[in-house]
Amino acid sequence: MDSHNKEKQPTNFIRNIINEDLSSGNHSSVITRFPPEPNGYLHIGHAKSICLNFGTAKDYKGYCNLRFDDTNPAKEDIEYVKSIKEDIRWLGFNWNGEVKFSSSYFDIFYKCAEELISKGLAYVCFLSADETREYRGTLKKPGKSSPYRDTNIKENQTLFRKMKEGKFKEGECVLRAKIDMASSFMCMRDPTLYRIRFETHHQTNDDWCIYPMYDFAHCLGDAIEGVTHSICTLEFQDNRRIYDWTLEHIDKFNKIDRPHQYEFSRLNIEYSTTSKRKLKLLVDNKHVTSWNDPRMPTISGLRRRGYTPASIRDFSERIGVSKVNSLTDVAILETSIRDDLNKSAPRTMGVINPIKLIIENYQRGEIETLKAPIHPQNEEMGVREIFFSREVYIDEKDFVEIAPNNKYKRLAINKEVRLRNSYIVKATHFDSDKNGNVKTIYCTYDPETLGKNPSDGRKVKGVIHYVEASRAISAEFRIYDRLFLDSNPAKFDDLSSTLNPNSLNIKNGFVEPNLSNAKAEIAYQFEREGYFCRDSESEGLVFNKTVGLRDTWNQ
């Protein structure tokens, strides 16, 4: 990477390591990878990792592989493979060459396991799962050796072949590394390398009944692909020891420029969870409608809600890369999407809580076509047609009978406001239903105030939005709140105990007629209300609220 580009890029400890590796000649290029397990949909935490791995490789004119670590067929599905590929492309990244699968390397992994056995560094163990846990010891107490640890090499070779041939039952035995049962690191106390699973695999079908463990397969996959910098989250920090141990004991991969693992803090964001297991429980227990429910922190959920790829990339850049775990303020994510949409989203009007306003001195049956800017700060976006007539809808929040003070800028009896991009109106009286709820407001308008202030010099500061009644299009508005009541739901074993019962509020109102053919996931600013996009999964006209015009949640 040249010095000019280098100055433009953010600095973090991973880039410092890469810079040192390149300057020392340890590596001549940068190859990273993004290695999801296809057992669920990607979430905002994965987005950070995607931006880091793909973005770093791109900045250094290297490349990033997409590799599915598909070593556990019991939990994996081709549906997740497809969704992950789609999410990565949507975020604006592409992988090097063909999509890769750990399962494509099963033959190589098997030979590597055989090599460890032949060196006396792996053995077949028949301890039960409970016995294995007992033998492993604790953080304060060393483990003790399995009675099968000293089985001779030839017999281990035979037993491992029998495992491959399906001669043993599931759970009857495993292949373990022979490392150090007294290690202060639990992961080094003879970790399991292979286990038996009689499951049909989404890539290899029934070709295999033994599957490598993640810690064994991951480092080998990196080495096979020539990955230079294996970037993962902090929970794998201790596992770096088994990563290094494995590569150091496989002759083909024990070289100076072999891959090295570097850890960064995973993303934990307020009022959400980035645990794939817990997200799956939310879906399975029907607390949300699906993985792409707009309340979910999944990439597909954020996309459906109206978040843009640029906003998520910006968010990832804002929070940076560190080795310190922390809880990220959700306002940072919302600021990223708000800043992006403020620049790009076309303006329109939608009335979420409609109430009819009748302009008594406007001619019956007449409909006036007016012009309004599509974006007030970007004239190049042009203008749109809006309509005005005797009857319009305004939001019920924009009217009170008596203004509470002189600074009140909405509609009240004998008070004037401007209807956005049209005329000044003055409320005169209203009708109520039997419960005292305002049903219809009556007013007059000043026909001389289209696009200009009153000629007599009176000041009208209030501006409210509206939709002309006869051409208004009915629409459903889905207003979202935090999915959880507690800012740190991770501390709850049962997430249902902190679920927000009001995380979704559905309203029925009206929008401008130009939104009848609104495309899904394209953002609009509903003036004075916030940013919305059409829902991609619903029939009819349904709009999801992406974010408000400003952060009002804590106010």
Image (cartoon, rainbow, N blue to C red):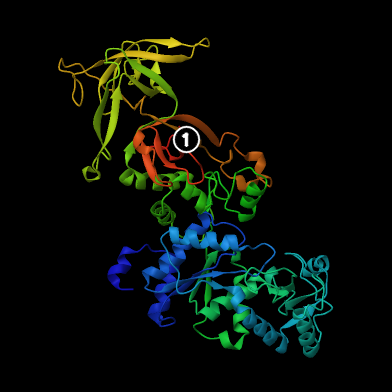
Q: Nearer the viewer, residue 39 or 259?
A: 39
Report x, y in % for residue 43: 53, 54
| Up-down relation of residue 13 to residue 297 (above or below) | below
Crowding at label 1, few (<14), some or many (≥20) Cα neighbours within 10 Å? few
Q: Report helix, strand or loop for mark 1.
A: loop
State left or right for residue 360 relative to residue 39: left
- Count of numbered circles on the image: 1
Considering only vertical position in the picture, is 119 above or below 547?
A: below
**Vertical arrangement, residue 462 with respect to residue 111, above or below:** above
- Along the line of sight, the residue nearer the viewer: 178 or 337: 337
Q: Would residue 504 be seen by someone viewing this image from the given angle?
A: yes
Give the residue drawn at x 63%, y 62%: 77
Looking at the image, residue 539 lies above or below residue 104: above
Quadrant location of residue 11?
A: bottom left
Residue 327 visible in this rendered orientation of the protein: no
Q: Quadrant of the C terminus?
A: top left
Which residue is the site of mark 1? 553
The residue at 39%/42% (across/down) is 518
Residue 402 is situated, as x and y percent measured from the top left of the image, at 38, 11
Report whether 327 appears left or right of 363: right
Which of 328/116 is in front?
116
Residue type marked 1 = Trp
Residue 172 locus on image (x, y percent):
82, 72
Measured as percent of width and height from the top left, residue 271 is found at: 55, 43
Is 517 left, or right, of 482 in this rendering?
Answer: left
Quarter holding the N terminus is bottom left
Outermost residue to the left: 455
